[in-house]
Image: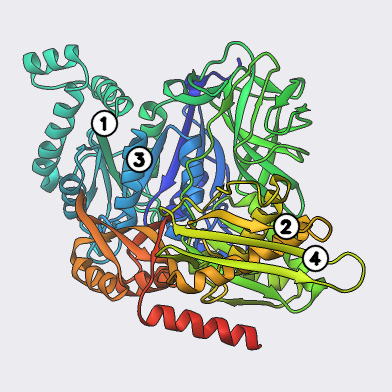
Amino acid sequence: MSLTSADIRNVAIVGHNGTGKTSLLEHILSNSGVISRAESVNSGKTVSDYTDEEIEKGLSIHASLASLEWANKTMNFIDTPGTADFVGEVVSAFRATESALMVIDARAGVQIETIKLWRRLNNRNMSRIVFINKMDIDRADFHAAFSDISERFSKTCVPVSIPIGSGSSYKGIINLIENSAYLIGETGSTDIPADMLETVEEYRLTLIESAAEGDDSLMEKYFEEGTLTPDEIRQGLIIGLKDNKIVPVLCGSAETDTGIVSLLNFLAIAAPSPDVKIEHALKKDEEIEIPVNPVGGVSLFSFKTTIDQFSGKLSFIKVVTGRLNTDCELHNPAVGKKEKPSKLYRMVGKKLIEVRELAAGDIGIIAKSAHLGTNNTLSSPELSYTFKSLALPHPIHTLSISAADKKSEDKMNEALHRVMEEDLTFQVGFNKETKENVVSGMGELHINMILNRIMEKQKISINTRTPRIAYRETITKPSGAEYTHKKQSGGHGQYGRVIIEIKPLERGEFFSFENVIKGGSVSKGYMPGIEKGLLEAMEEGYLAGYPLVDIGVSIVDGKEHPVDSSEMAFKLAAKGALKTAIVKANVVLLEPIMKLSVFIEDNYLGDILSDLSGKRGRVLGQEDIGGGLTLVQAEVPQSEMLRYAIDLKSLTSGTGSFELEFHHYEIATGKVVEDVIKQSKENQEN
């Protein structure tokens, strides 16, 4: 019997770094028989953390896919990094799944990444299940963690399992739906300990009431009989979770392999299947909705790309409509190419498992595709839409890079562009104004790991430094000048005379040119040359060699020679005229101003505001966004933001995060101007 969309569960495993996500997946895989035994993170042998970097550093860097069968359901888990530098991996995982398994440390409770991830889930209206892990560690407290979640987030938290003891006295869990206990080291269920009956009754009442609220008929029965059967509880939870009205909370310990089976059973029954999901696509520039549908033409979305040294290029795909097999002739509108997948796979960590087909809603791999890239759509020719791209965050940390010689630079650039294909939150570019190669990413750790990997593999050295700022210059008052370009060197000479007036324009208008000559003293045929000369003079700047912008120029008069005038002569005359005029136009330096959004825990607010004040920032507002988190919005000069990823990490003990984008240019004053001019002169001398 073919797999249907209703039989699939796609779940992203997310949470703050160190909550035990990778260990949890290990035990999920061992309990489902996919692997013979669960390995520890310290062993370097876990299924999901398999790259050299992840093994060396002991943390997840890449989203890792693992497929398994459980209770007649195909389950695709995507284990994600918990460090903010690798949030792009989380975004791609959210796009491919219908629910998230939020892992929380039983001792630490809700942490900063928990809050940030919760907000991302809210923005997607995405279902989530909480697993309170590490019930066996010292000072583990299920009740405190459960209360923390309930108080910080505006969702109804529903207990599904609770622990028996904690820390060194932890013995196992109680499944509240089944009303039975599961102890460490025992495979079957047993009776609930007598000293926990009262606690169980209290939590079970909350569970039943929440389940009853999911369906009118269940609510009616609950009022009549005062309770619900296990199947009725499950039915109510399925409805509530599907509608994203409740957050089921389970618990256990990956380390002691407890609570895992109850978690798997619950996900198999209650986690939403792909047929609840709507994908957004573009058709002739109009946004349309595409539901997961097994009928009709095939369409799929590529949400991630990796390049494996043994398997080559691997494209992670989510099938949205139809049934994908190797006979499908598909079209890639992004590159205008046809594609026929040669082989299809499921994946468990780095292990590929070949399959004949993938149903609508399923996740899998297309290997060695020549043209398929992240964010691409593949579809049957008759389907004329493309799925919307991943909503990835903007890079926030930038470095200028250079290599020792041309050969090393070629190797570096080739490797950098290969990384860009895999990681869309990492960007490489050349800044024409500052004449620098620059790389941008989600933080210092993100960029350094990429550059270190390239240096090690390519056997080259890469130098990094703080990038230069793309300042601008402009004028603040009107001026005028006349200039004659005259040159005689035998034969035809060069002659052109122009009289111009200049004025400041509104910020962002860049340049305007107007011919107001009366009487035709300069032919219209020379006007293009005059305009080119003006633009060249603007490009060269005045104060510190940065481009002049927002200048309006009018040519009011001039003179030409019947033999010696040419477009080149008038170009040089115009250039000289502008350079003369700006001397009296009060030239000022413009600096780029960035729009900054900082997400911090409330207790760091004072430190952040003080730091922004010291960075010449203007705080626009602050907002309590729930979960003990504050959003601060400000405008700050770009020159103060070059090391903000490092500064914020230091100020908030690594818990804060921020988003940054260019906003506008404004006039710089004081020491900033002096320093920029001084640096410009030093660069010219060198």
> In which quadrant will I find the N terminus?
top right
Image coords of residue 318 (percent x, y):
57, 31
Q: Residue at x 32, y 60 (%)?
A: 635
> Which amino acid is tagged 3?
Leu
- Above or below, 343 against 505 in this view is above
* Earlier residue among tags 3 and 2: 3
Q: Tell me the tag on residue 494.
A: 4
Label 1 with label 4: CB-CB less than 8 Å: no
Q: Nearer the viewer, mark 4 or mark 2?
A: 2
What is the crowding at mark 3: few (fewer than 14 residues within 10 Å), some, or many (at least 20)?
A: some
The numbered disc on residue 560 is: 2
Q: Check disc 1 and report the residue beneath it.
A: 178
Q: Indicate the amino acid at tag 4.
A: Gln
- The label nearer to you, 1 versus 4, is 4
Task: Count neighbours of disc 4 (C-alpha within 10 A) and say few if under 14, some if 14 to 19, many if 20 or more.
Answer: many
- Alpha carbon distance from label 3 to label 1: 29 Å
Task: Give SS at disc 2.
Answer: loop
Q: Which residue is mark 3?
A: 121
- In this rendering, which labeled residue sits more in front, label 3 or label 1? 3
